[in-house]
Image (spheres, grey):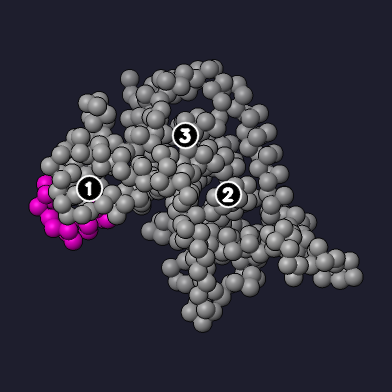
């Protein structure tokens, strides 16, 4: 029986057996009939295992709750901004944009703009080799586009913000670098996506909104560069679902699945946790300890050349390999990662497998050659990599 048939049977159970589903998905999930999108929603703990609850769950949690977030975090602040100046005599010190109080509504608004500008800059470059993110979505958010809502949209906020002629770069340390206006006269360089006409939205704008809502709901981490690379493949998978009933809710479903994934992965993005046991440094070192155990000769060669794990595994681990392979291959790797119960341990196995598969080149190369190999990984066949990682798992 084909993998497609077996997965369909597993998904047709009234109460889905998660163990069986994980085992099937580990070897790659079929795209047909929207099976991959459905499996990801279950594996990322979004959809309940009781299939009879799916329809009501998607409507209530997915749409109602997410719509409430849009109203509170985009539409209401936008209305307040649009109304500013209409009734000047009613503006109290508390309401005034120049109020120096750090807790004032406007101080929050301007800080949000800074985060929004960084998100905007990053999502306009998401998978530039694919046309998908520049195209209009079939299901633009009606709540956002409703002409009855006279408010400042995120699109308008980006265009009108006082920082629009400046390049804002919030790096992972939380430092915001603002270059002088003269350096960035063109607001949208040629390598960034353009805004579509009013009434339609490009897919990148939907991703921007998801990340902005996430940043507002998670002020401790807000937005860190790289989150766009994690939300992109999830949104792409849900927004290309052949089942239009699910595809229509791609934005809300992506938001909740991304939030669930980040709840497991967020420590990698929090600098203050880097050196703790749940931080990224520990995970990067785990790749080398595993390599030492599996291939001592290769480990000693990298140590001798002073090639530290943070030179390349930082990106591999924080971005779940989304920058190392083409999108269809990233999605295939994520099928396996999401279906493994201890998915971030399996990611370490995958990284170790990637090193061992190019061991001959690494053993022969000098520092420069090896750094180039590790930062532009030469093997594109992800099946070989996943097979090797599984072999390492079985032998550990």
User: In the rendered view of the protein, which quadrant contains the C terminus?
Assistant: top left
The mark found on residue 40 in the picture is 3
Total marks placed:
3
State the image coordinates of residue 391 (x, y, percent, origin top left).
23, 29
The mark found on residue 132 in the picture is none
State the image coordinates of residue 309 (x, y, percent, origin top left).
28, 49
The single residue placed furthest to the bottom in the displayed view is 182
The mark found on residue 220 in the picture is 2
Could you tell me if the residues under marks 1 and 2 are in contact, i.e. CB atoms within 8 Å? no
Q: Is residue 373 magenta?
A: yes
Which sits in the foreground, 10 or 360?
A: 360
- First reached walking from the N terminus: tag 1 or tag 3: 3
Q: Find the distance from the CA under tag 1 to the CA under tag 2.
A: 37 Å
Q: What segment carries the magenta color?
A: 359-377
The residue under label 1 is 379
State the image coordinates of residue 270 (x, y, percent, origin top left).
48, 49
Which sits in the foreground, 19 or 309?
A: 309
Q: Does the magenta stretch include residue 135?
A: no
């Amino acid at each position: 029986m084909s993998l497609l048939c077996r997965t369909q049977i597993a998904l047709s159970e009234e109460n889905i057996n998660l163990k069986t589903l994980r085992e099937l998905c580990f070897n790659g999930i079929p795209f047909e009939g929207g099976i991959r999108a459905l499996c990801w929603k279950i594996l990322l703990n979004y959809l309940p295992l009781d299939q009879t609850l799916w329809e009501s769950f998607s409507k209530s949690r997915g749409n109602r709750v997410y719509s409430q977030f849009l109203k509170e975090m985009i539409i209401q602040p936008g209305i307040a901004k649009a109304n500013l100046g209409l009734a000047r005599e009613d503006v109290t010190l508390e309401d005034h944009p120049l109020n120096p109080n750090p807790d004032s509504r406007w101080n929050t608004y301007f800080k949000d703009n800074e985060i929004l500008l960084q998100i905007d800059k990053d999502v306009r470059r998401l998978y530039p080799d694919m046309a998908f993110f520049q195209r209009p979505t079939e299901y633009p958010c009606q709540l956002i586009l409703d002409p009855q809502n006279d408010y400042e949209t995120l699109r308008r906020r980006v265009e009108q913000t006082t920082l629009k002629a400046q390049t804002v770069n919030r790096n992972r340390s939380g430092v915001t670098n603002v270059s002088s206006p003269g350096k960035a006269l063109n607001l949208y360089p040629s390598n960034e996506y353009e805004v579509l006409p009013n009434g339609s939205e490009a897919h990148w704008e939907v991703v921007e909104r998801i990340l902005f809502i996430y940043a507002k709901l998670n002020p401790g981490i807000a937005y860190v560069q790289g989150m766009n690379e994690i939300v992109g493949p999830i949104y792409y998978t849900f927004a290309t679902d052949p089942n239009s009933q699910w595809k229509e809710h791609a934005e809300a479903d992506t938001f909740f699945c991304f939030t669930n994934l980040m709840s497991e992965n967020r420590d990698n993005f929090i600098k203050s946790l880097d050196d703790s046991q749940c931080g990224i440094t520990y995970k990067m070192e785990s790749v080398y300890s595993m390599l030492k155990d599996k291939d001592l000769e290769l480990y000693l060669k990298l140590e001798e050349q002073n090639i530290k794990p943070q030179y390349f595994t930082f990106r591999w681990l924080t971005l779940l390999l989304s920058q190392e392979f083409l999108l269809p291959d990233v999605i295939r790797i994520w099928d396996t990662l999401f279906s493994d119960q201890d998915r971030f341990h399996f990611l370490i196995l995958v990284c170790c497998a990637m090193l061992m598969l190019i061991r001959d080149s690494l053993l022969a190369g000098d520092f420069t050659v090896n750094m180039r190999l590790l930062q532009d990984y030469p093997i594109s066949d992800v099946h070989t990599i996943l097979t090797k990682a599984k072999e390492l798992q079985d032998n550990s």
